[in-house]
Structures are given as C-alpha cells and as structure tokens.
Amino acid sequence: MIEQAYDRLREGYFEEAVERFSECVLLEPAQPRAYQGRALSYFQLKRWPLSASDFLKAKELDPGDPENWIGAAMCLAMENKIYEAIRIFEELLSRQPQCVRAHIQLGQLYYRLGVIAKGHAQMDLALTSRLSPEERREIERLKGEQLALDKRRYYRPDFEALRRNNRLGN
C-alpha cells in the first residue's frame, strides 16, 4: 500500500498521495516512510506546516534518516522560521557531520541571513565530504553567486571577524 502511495507521489498526484499516505498512517502509525511520503506530498502542495509536522514525526520515528531532518528544516525555512531551521540542520550535522546536503542547505540559509562567512564555512565543509560531481558543481555555483553579490554590495563588515579581533585584543 505504501508503494502505491509513493507511485502516486512520483506521478504528481499529490492530493491523492496525501490520502493514500494518510491511510498508511492510520494502519501503521509507527511507519516513518508513511509520514515521510505524506510530508513530501504536502511539500509539493506548499502546505509547509503540515509537511513540517510529518517530517518531524518521521524524524522522531527514524532519527537516522537525514531526509526527515532536511525536510523539516526546509519546511521551516519556507515559513521564514530560519533560526529554527538552522537549529535542526546544526543538530543533524552534529550527528552526521558528513551530510553534504545539510551543509549546502545550512550554508544557503546563512547566505540568506547575510552571515556570509558562516555560509562559506558550511560550503567549505561540504567540499571536504564525499560528494558527487553534481554537488561539487552546485557548491561552486552557490559560492560564485554569493561572491558576485558581495562585489555589487556596499561594504558590510564581517561581524564574526570583528568579534574575534575584539576578543584577541582584550
């Protein structure tokens, strides 16, 4: 039954997939794949709170699957709950430091906040992990875009560097 629900999801029938995954949840409430599938369906429908709730439930049932963590964080980010999303990514990376997608997404959130140095640091950490050629290209593209944006901006101090210098000077 769960595979039929995933088929509906892959075919783009998101509302129907939600219904099928909901049936799976009723029959097997401890099945993380059912919550994850329904979360993915809700995500496609841009129902961020429902998607986040299901990803969080799937994460609770299967904390070893990084997709649940990433999905929950991305839903929160879509709702502009950036700091909550960052906390989820940081917790995931404390458990699975080689999770390339988490580094990339966290780096993008830092870029979005204007904390460029932390964004670059996350991208650099991702580059030290085992990554695919596509992920490497994506990281290089994102860093390049950020560097191009920085060149067009007025000078904005690196607050992290200023804090470090102040600590060293005191």
Image (spheres, rainbow, N blue to C red):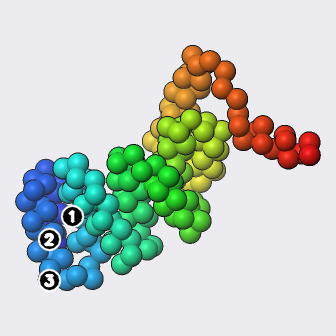
Mark 2 lies on residue: 22
Label 2 vs 3, first from the N-terminus: 2
Q: Quadrant of the N terminus?
A: bottom left
The kind of residue on which mark 3 rests is Leu
Check whether the beta carbons of the residues at disc 1 and disc 2 lie within 8 A of each other.
Answer: yes
As helix, strand or loop, the secondary structure at mark 3 comes to helix
Label 3 vs 1, first from the N-terminus: 3
Label 1 vs 2, first from the N-terminus: 2
Residue drawn at x 42%, y 63% is 69
Q: Quadrant of residue 151?
A: top right
Crowd around label 1: few <14 · some 14–19 · many ≥20 (10 Å): many
Side of 5 relative to 37 (left or right): left
Residue drawn at x 33%, y 72% is 57
> How far apart are labels 2 and 3 at the CA level?
9 Å
The kind of residue on which mark 1 rests is Arg
Mark 3 lies on residue: 27
Side of 28 relative to 138 (left or right): left
**In x, y percent, where is residue 64?**
45, 73
Looking at this view, name the residue that lies furthest to the front: 170
Q: Is residue 137 above or below residue 36?
A: above
Mark 1 lies on residue: 38
